[in-house]
Amino acid sequence: MNAYSQITPEAIQEDMRYLQLLSRNFPTIADASTEIINLEAILNLPKGTEHFLADLHGEYEAFQHVLRNASGAIKRKVNEIFGNTLRENEKKELCTLIYYPEQKLDLIKGIEPDLDDWYVITLNQLVRVCQNVSSKYTRSKVRKALPKEFSYIIQELLHESSMVPNKQAYINVIISTIISTRRADDFIIALCNLIQRLTIDTLHVLGDIFDRGPGPHRIMDILCDYHNFDIQWGNHDILWMGAAAGNDCCMANVLRLAMRYGNLGVLEDGYGINLLPLATFAMEMYADDPCTLFGPKVEGSESPYNEKTLRMIAQMHKAISIIQFKLEAEIIQRRPDFGMEDRMLLHRIDLKRNTLTLDGKEYELKDSFLPTVDPADPYRLTPEEREIMNKLHHSFVSSEKLKKHMRCIFRYGCMYAVNNSNLLFHASIPLNADGSLKDVMIAGQPYKGKRLLEKVGHLIRTAYFAEEDNEDKQFAIDYVWYLWCGKDSPAFDKNKMATFERYFLKEKELHKEIKGHYYTLRNEERVCNMLLDEFGVVGEHRHVINGHVPVKTIQGENPIKANGKLMVIDGGFSKAYHSETGIAGYTLVYHSRGFQLVQHEPFTSMQKAIEEGQDIKSSTQIVELSSQRMMVKDTDKGRELVTQINDLKKLLVAYRMGLIKEKAL
């Protein structure tokens, strides 16, 4: 039956207002027909490749290399295209050029005896790679990705075959002219960047961009300019969002973590946070204190700091930690409904006996030099501490770079996403012991499952964007801190954050943070199916994808759980986790033929990648392969296009029945 015969005049009348608006974009039968043809053709292209990453934790160099090499996909493409026609070393050199074109060109020009000949060979090779990676996209999509100054030339090279008679000479002239006009370097850089861009169609970042590593601000710089990505907020991202929204507790935690991992550059150079008041106070207050427990976690030989600076960081680390405990107590006392009184520990300290009493038992403190803690009023900030926080508060809320990155993280981020039958969120959905959704009380109202994540997302946006006179703003700002460390927070979901115990008490059992039921129950297929139903995820092959908890690959833990329904892709990008996980991160790749999990070994350095061609060593595990290649029509985007096609078909019928007049003939 003809699809158009099913469109009745009544159906057109029902949608007349919308069709009148649609006719502005497609004012003639020819325009509507052409668009239908275009969209139908797109539906039958292979789906674009999606890459999923989680828990980047400031590891800028490893992250940007994984983007540049597309988790090993570019290397595989080069091997497929050139097979045995190039030596292994030549393929490695070509890959390195694609990853780091500017830097590699500088090296090559210093050693290559016949540069023009190298340009000819290399440009032809890059065109072949570019033709391969662009083949699954429409010309229109490729054209939009092209750099403006070379758009026409690249289109000619991509869509002309050297196998056709008379075309090889045409292509040769284009390439020789590029070289003779001294544009070869710029053209090579443009082609390499295009290859990188087309190899990853969509990037999903499942949270925790910030903290631990040295370059979260540089990661955000990349993302703010990236062509197609989304973020599912993690607890470390939310912490920074809270700091940018003006929550002093969040600021103190951000500062403490920066001191703990020796990342002062992120604050000072990345975001212009003035640390001088804190440094001056700490060096004076702890002048005679070795601050042994607060030395930053930095690699000895790789540390950018001398002994004097390391001591100063330890002093600042201790000073901001005590300030943090006091500030957190202010929120805990102000918000009894948060149920976090057990995190107030300063009043349990006996400074004369150097002990802390917990649950009726005394524990000896590893460090009892606390000159700013008044036993009579332990949670009161001293005037100097209050002044420091006022200055830091001003630095955070007025940082233009931080504002730019927050706008990006809000624009492209959310608590969860449903994409092509995959449910993405960073950490947890709070559950009861029986696997049912847990009610979480927020301002006296219960929320669970999807409604909980939507409420949390709304509160985070209220904290940052609401006007000062908004009655919900102060609660929202306080709640953002709860999301960082609260026991029913879907971004955390542990019984406590044992920061104080880890610093001051030697008993390991007190350091333990007990995870919520989700982290064990997610291994069960029935629980994953329940969550997928809760979020309205449909499809024959549907999955939950998480980060947050590092997968201990070194101990034999499998990132694929619940009979393939759930994938945990936190493989430990952060150097702090390498010894725990045994690897240096995962990328989950979802292309037209199915899912592949790419496991990365530690990245050496960008310099070695450029000079020696050292790529990240990666191994690929096939998670799920489709019997049929997935096309655009099988994706969420495809379903949108089908709806657009049906609307255009109605418009076409309306034109032909005279219900809407063509606007240009």
Image (cartoon, rainbow, N blue to C red):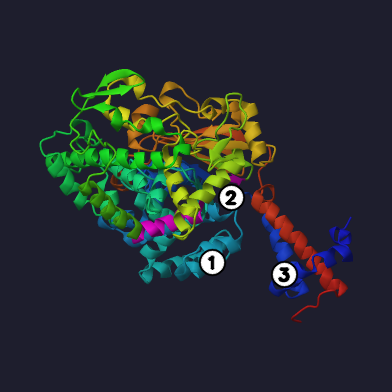
In this view, 276 is above or below 546: below
Give coordinates of residue 285: x percent, y percent.
Answer: 15, 41
Residue 90 in view, yes or no: no
Whether the magenta-drawn stretch holds residue 361 is answered as: no
| Res 48 label | 2
Magenta stretch?
A: 400-419
| Residue at 75 percent of width and 75 percent of height | 28
The three-letter code of the residue at mark 1 reads: Glu
| Res 22 label | 3
Give coordinates of residue 226: x percent, y percent.
Answer: 46, 56
Helix, strand or loop at label 1? It is helix
The three-letter code of the residue at mark 3 reads: Leu
In this view, 42 is above or below 587: below
Q: Residue furthest left?
A: 288
The three-letter code of the residue at mark 2 reads: Gly
Give coordinates of residue 503: x percent, y percent.
Answer: 27, 30
Give coordinates of residue 17: x percent, y percent.
Answer: 77, 70
User: Which is more toward the observer, 11 or 64?
Assistant: 11
User: Which is more toward the observer, 135 or 280?
Assistant: 280
From the image, tell me which residue sits under label 1.
156
Q: Residue furthest front?
A: 376
